[in-house]
Image (tube, rainbow, N blue to C red):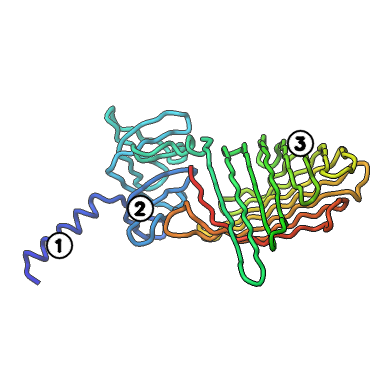
């Protein structure tokens, strides 16, 4: 290799290191990349070789960043400038107004000027929408057709969620309608501590196949957040409710006070695949043997490189202990194409 070429390559390499952020850990490792964020005592370092690495600040011996950062101290003071820690428990912020040296324990967060305070991002409520379709058919010895559609809208914050849903299902078997169900509802859930919260929900349903002209279910009660992690959540609910059912035939309308129990579980695998399980148990207070159980378990697989399209496969069971329909249990196996957006 020619000396001039070697000098040029060396200059580019040295220049790239000089412009990069450097983090040195207590065990002697030197990590080079870009400090995206310092939040809750963790440095987020984006590298070209391993993506974003998260390093606890108590494992960092020193770090250096010439690029400006916005720093928020625990006292609420906000400064912008280059940051560096030369070891120990001190950090230096070089701002336009001068140099501030303080303890690293007093740094609540630091982020790029083009980014947002992570605390503000965590506390923001955001709308999320989702639409799905499930369409299957068969012609030949038998003619079968099934259409299932749904729409969900969710306004979610760190400690509360407002949700709306709409479902429609229709199916035919050799010209005979086997499904014709429309349902919709809304719910709100809010947590006032890490574990405890409250909820309220309402649902309306019409299902002529099951002789239901109108079913109205309303409930409110307490929520218990048993697991609340980035990759997994588990919420249990218990409360009181009221259910009213008007039938298509001459059967007398029914209404009763109910108990309301529920479990909602989500689990995300490797930030891509997602499993979701929901279970609702609504017994009558007057007659505990009269109850309704709804179970829905699904698994989502992303389609393509984005987060918008995915395929959801699952099973849904609806059991009615006291019903005018021919069967007490309705079981649906589904494969849906789902599109979600903000």
Residue that appears at 40% across and 39% down: 110
Alpha carbon distance from label 2 to label 3: 51 Å
Indicate the position of residue 113 as horizontal and vertical percent values. 34, 37
Residue bearing mark 3: 220
Report if the CB atoms under discs 1 and 2 are less than 8 Å apart: no
For disc 1, the neighbor class at 10 Å (few under 14, some 14 to 19, many from 20) is: few
330 and 88: which is toward the camera: 330
Q: Nearer the viewer, mark 3 or mark 1?
A: 3
Secondary structure category for the residue under label 1 = helix
* Among the two numbered marks 3 and 1 on one chain, the one whose residue lies closer to the N terminus: 1
Q: Is residue 91 left or right of residue 290?
A: left
Quarter location, residue 184: top right
Residue that appears at 34% across and 62% down: 49
Residue bearing mark 2: 23
Secondary structure category for the residue under label 3 = strand
Report if the CB atoms under discs 3 and 1 are less than 8 Å apart: no
Indicate the position of residue 226 as horizontal and vertical percent values. 69, 48
Residue 56 against residue 128 in the figure, above or below: below
For disc 2, the neighbor class at 10 Å (few under 14, some 14 to 19, many from 20) is: many
Residue 73 against residue 295 in the figure, above or below: above
* Among the two numbered marks 1 and 2 on one chain, the one whose residue lies closer to the N terminus: 1
* Among the two numbered marks 2 and 3 on one chain, the one whose residue lies closer to the N terminus: 2
Residue that appears at 22% across and 54% down: 16
Q: Is residue 121 left or right of residue 190?
A: left
For disc 3, the neighbor class at 10 Å (few under 14, some 14 to 19, many from 20) is: many
Indicate the position of residue 39 as horizontal and vertical percent values. 46, 43
Taking the image as drawn, is residue 160 in sight? no
Alpha carbon distance from label 1 to label 2: 24 Å
Residue bearing mark 1: 9
């Amino acid at each position: 290799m020619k000396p001039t070429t070697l000098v040029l390559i060396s200059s580019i390499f040295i220049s790239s290191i000089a412009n990069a952020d450097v983090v040195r850990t207590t065990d002697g490792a030197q990590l080079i990349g870009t400090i995206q964020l310092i939040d809750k005592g963790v440095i987020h370092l984006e590298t070209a070789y391993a993506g974003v690495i998260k390093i606890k600040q108590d494992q960092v011996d020193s770090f250096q960043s010439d690029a400006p950062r916005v720093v928020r101290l625990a006292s609420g003071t906000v400064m912008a400038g280059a940051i560096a820690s030369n070891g120990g428990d001190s950090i230096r912020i070089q701002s336009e107004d001068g140099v501030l040296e303080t303890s690293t324990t007093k740094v609540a967060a630091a982020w790029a000027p083009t980014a947002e305070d992570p605390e503000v991002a965590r506390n923001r409520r955001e709308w999320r929408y989702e639409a799905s379709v499930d369409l299957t058919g068969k012609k030949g010895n038998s003619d079968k057709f099934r259409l299932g559609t749904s729409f969900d809208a969710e306004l979610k914050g760190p400690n509360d969620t407002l949700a709306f849903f709409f479902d429609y299902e229709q199916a035919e078997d050799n010209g005979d309608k086997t499904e014709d169900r429309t349902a919709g509802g809304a719910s709100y859930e809010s947590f006032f501590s890490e574990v405890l919260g409250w909820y309220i929900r309402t649902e309306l349903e019409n299902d002529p196949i099951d002789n239901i002209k109108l079913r109205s279910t309303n409930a409110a009660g307490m929520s218990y957040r048993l697991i609340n992690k980035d990759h997994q959540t588990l919420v249990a609910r218990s409360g009181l409710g009221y259910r009213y059912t008007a039938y298509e035939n001459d059967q007398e309308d029914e209404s009763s006070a109910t108990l309301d129990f529920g479990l909602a579980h989500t689990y995300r695998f490797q930030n891509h695949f997602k499993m979701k399980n929901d279970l609702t148990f609504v017994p009558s207070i007057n007659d505990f043997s009269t109850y309704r159980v709804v179970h829905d378990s699904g698994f989502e697989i992303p389609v393509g490189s984005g987060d918008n399209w995915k395929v959801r496969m699952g099973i849904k069971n609806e059991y009615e202990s006291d019903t005018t329909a021919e069967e007490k249990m309705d079981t649906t196996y589904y494969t849906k194409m789902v599109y979600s957006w903000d």
